[in-house]
Amino acid sequence: MAKILCVLYPDPVTGYPETYPRDDLPKMDRYPDGQTLPTPKGLDFQPGAMLGSVSGELGLRKYLEGLGHTLVVISDKEGPDSAFERELVDADIVISQPFWPAYLTAERIAKAPKLKLAITAGIGSDHVDLKAAIEHGVTVAEVTYSNSISVAEHVVMMILGLVRNYLPSYQWVVNKNLWDTTGGQGWNIADCISRAYDLEGMEVGTVAAGRIGLAVLRRLQPFDVQLHYTDKHRLPEAVERELNLTFHPDVESMIRVCDVVTINCPLHPETEHLFDDNLLGKMKRGAYLINTARGKICDRDAVARALESGQLAGYAGDVWFPQPAPKDHPWRTMPHHGMTPHVSGTTLSAQTRYAAGTREILECWFEGRPIREEYLIVDGGKLAGTGAHSYTA
Ligand code: NDP
């Protein structure tokens, strides 16, 4: 029987929710490219429930214990004395979410001789050392597409938030301390709009036009912007025509002409610290940068410097390194940012899909059926499926 170690984020500080704002989720069978949503044989949770926190257990306990397996759910994941390090030594399967990543480093993989499967409940398996997984014969799988649209919606929200200066204007409404500085008027309109523009007409580019990048382009098209992209592989001509896209063979030629840049590629050796002082310096002065892909794609201090100098007009995203970000992480305090914790891909809607996808992967594993190609990152000692297409080890 297997031991499954599941690392999830802590429950809400007010306790596991007893009620939710809405009663149901929209029904969907397929993603925009025709891929089917997860199709597990069974589900033991209510769609829309909190599944990604410790008490939610991704809805897996009944199923796994019914098969005689052991499920251990923890959130303590950092450092040598963490529950994760303790429990990992005899675990057969590890499940982790990118929002609360259990970093499976080469050292940790070496300490887990029984480990055979690492599942990312979500998308993006960069918290797993893929080279070490390949060397130790660990299969790595993620729930491709499960939260791509969730992230694309977040990107559009953040672009509009930055360009229109939403968060500082909101602060004028809720911050009671500002009351006195306006002579009792309650807000200052000129302050709110001194950094506010329209998105219409701007040049907007995405680094990568995969599932998220393309969904962002599609959602932005009605705003009457000029759309750009760069990617390792070119999109079909019909899509380029439909969205009136300008393709750039490299990131640099794209960012030179864009007012807004959104990053939607995976983190791998090719993209780590891609946005450093040098590249940021080649962007248009006053450009906006939105990164919901992975924190390490940007050089932490270079981003803060670019905001302070005015080279960037705004930076937003939900991805950091490490996660959770330390108290003194400069992205918490740098000017003109619109950061959130890592939340874009773990809405209650997204959790329903990736919990179902995790269950599907586990059912395949235990029943000896192949895991969908599109879910595979590493298998049989090499990059496989989606991993072979989009990652480098
Ligand atoms: P996809 O695999 O659909 O798309 C990734 C795209 O990136 C592919 O088109 C790939 O190219 C392209 N790419 C890879 N390397 C480069 C490069 N060096 N330069 C330009 N393009 C490159 O993944 P998704 O769109 O679903 O997700 C993208 C990333 O977003 C994930 O890897 C993850 O890191 C992040 N993410 C963040 C979430 C969050 O909650 N914030 C949630 C989900 C994902 P090609 O296929 O043509 O080779």
Image (tube, rainbow, N blue to C red):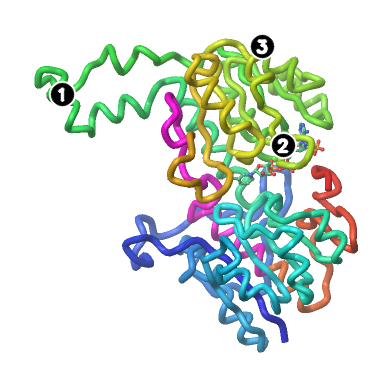
The local secondary structure at tag 1 comes to loop
Q: CA distance from mark 3 to mark 2?
A: 22 Å
Confirm if mark 3 falls within 8 A of ligand 1.
no
The three-letter code of the residue at mark 1 reads Gly
> Which corner quadrant holds the N terminus?
bottom right
Q: Nearer the viewer, residue 109 or 28?
A: 109
- Tell me the residue at 78%/40% (across/down): 269
- Tell me the residue at 50%/46% (across/down): 325
Q: Which mark is residue 386?
A: none
Question: Where does the image place residue 115, in percent across and percent down from the top left?
Answer: 76, 72
Mark 2 surroundings: few (<14), some (14-19) or many (≥20) residues within 10 A: some
Question: Where does the image place residue 372, in percent across and percent down from the top left?
Answer: 79, 60
Q: Which mark is residue 272?
A: 2
The three-letter code of the residue at mark 3 reads Val
- Tell me the residue at 71%/29% (across/down): 274
Q: Which mark is residue 257?
A: 3
Q: In the rendered view, would you say 332 is above or below 260?
A: below
- Give the magenta range: 331-359
Q: CA distance from mark 1 to mark 3?
A: 39 Å
Question: Does 342 appear in magenta?
Answer: yes
Q: In the rendered view, would you say 172 is above or below 32?
A: above
Mark sitting earlier along the chain (1/3): 1
Circles 2 and 1, Cβ within 8 Å, touching? The answer is: no
Residue, disc 1: 186
- Tell me the residue at 82%/31% (across/down): 232
Mark sitting earlier along the chain (3/2): 3
Mark 1 surroundings: few (<14), some (14-19) or many (≥20) residues within 10 A: some
* Left-right relation of 204 to 362: left
Q: Nearer the viewer, residue 372 or 275?
A: 275
* Left-right relation of 197 to 290: left
